[in-house]
Image (cartoon, rainbow, N blue to C red):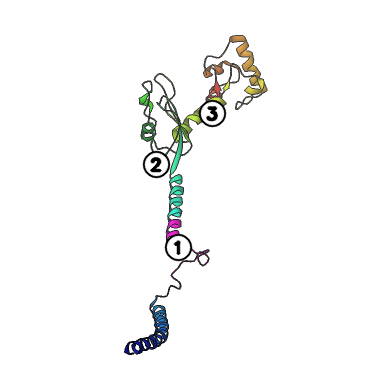
């Protein structure tokens, strides 16, 4: 009898315990959830959203763009500080070269590997400053053509002298119209020049023009730089 009563009591308290345990577990679970929500750090604004960042540049992107702009500026500045020169003649590597703006002929020849054994080094001005679009020609030994630097005063003087030489009128070959281009020479004097050379042969020097009627010392002095006999 005592055993049966004991078993009945255990069954009675078991269901009572289960009935009390369930509400306690539910309450405990709710408390845990609430505590976790209160203690969890807010992540709002910390997660980068692709949609929210559309059109915005990060600090890394800004630095990268600034670096690219600086590189482009440096390249533009470098191009402005460069000149292009055409090197020809007795050099080891004749070609078109791009150098710094203040470069000299010596710098150009160093880049080109120097001159050949046939180069006339006496005619080279190594200190000559180069300019953009210049043509430099290094002559060979025995060649009657010194270093040619287009655009310099020396070259301009050579061109001017050549132009003046070309403008001279050859009194041994000029026709009637050409001879009349000479200062103070009309149709009659031009014909006299032609008649003289046909009768006496060509003029050996400009001063021989004094043998033609109508040409005195003053006329010869005036025509001195305008006539040629070659």
- Nearest the camera: 156 or 53? 53
Read off the residue under disc 2: 102
Question: The C terminus appears in which quarter of the rendering?
Answer: top right
Q: Nearer the viewer, mark 2 or mark 3?
A: 2
Q: Position of residue 161 (x, y in %)?
A: 50, 28
Q: Residue 117: name its quadrant.
A: top left
Read off the residue under disc 1: 58
Residue stretch in magenta: 45-66
* Upstream in sequence: badge 3 or badge 1: 1
Read off the residue under disc 3: 163
The residue at 60%/20% (across/down) is 214
Please say if the residues under marks 3 and 1 sit with CB atoms less than 8 Å apart: no
Q: Position of residue 115 (x, y in %)?
A: 37, 26
**Mark 2 nearby-residue class (10 Å; few <14, some 14–19, many ≥20):** few
SS assignment at label 2: loop
Q: Is residue 151 left or right of residue 119?
A: right
Is residue 71 shown above or below 197? below
SS assignment at label 1: loop
**Mark 3 nearby-residue class (10 Å; few <14, some 14–19, many ≥20):** few
Residue placed furthest toward the front: 1
* Upstream in sequence: badge 1 or badge 2: 1
């Amino acid at each position: 009898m005592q055993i049966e009563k004991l078993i009945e009591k255990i069954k009675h308290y078991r269901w009572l315990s289960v009935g009390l345990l369930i509400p306690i577990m539910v309450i405990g679970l709710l408390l845990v959830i609430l505590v976790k929500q209160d203690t969890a750090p807010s992540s709002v604004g910390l997660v980068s959203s692709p949609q929210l960042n559309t059109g915005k540049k990060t600090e890394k992107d800004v630095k990268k763009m600034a670096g690219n702009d600086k590189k482009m500026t440096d390249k533009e500045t470098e191009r402005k500080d460069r000149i292009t020169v055409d090197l020809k003649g007795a050099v080891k590597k004749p070609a078109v070269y791009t150098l710094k703006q203040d470069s000299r002929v010596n710098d150009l020849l160093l880049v080109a590997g120097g001159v050949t054994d046939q180069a006339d080094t006496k005619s080279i001005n190594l200190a000559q400053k180069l300019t953009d679009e210049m043509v430099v020609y290094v002559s060979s030994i025995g060649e009657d053509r010194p270093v040619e630097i287009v655009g310099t005063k020396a070259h301009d003087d050579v061109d001017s002298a050549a132009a003046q030489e070309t403008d001279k009128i050859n009194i041994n070959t000029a026709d009637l119209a050409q001879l009349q281009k000479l200062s103070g020479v009309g149709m009659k004097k031009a014909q006299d020049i032609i008649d003289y050379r046909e009768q006496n042969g060509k003029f050996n020097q400009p001063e021989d023009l004094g043998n033609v009627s109508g040409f005195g010392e003053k006329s010869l002095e005036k025509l001195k730089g305008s006539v040629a006999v070659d």
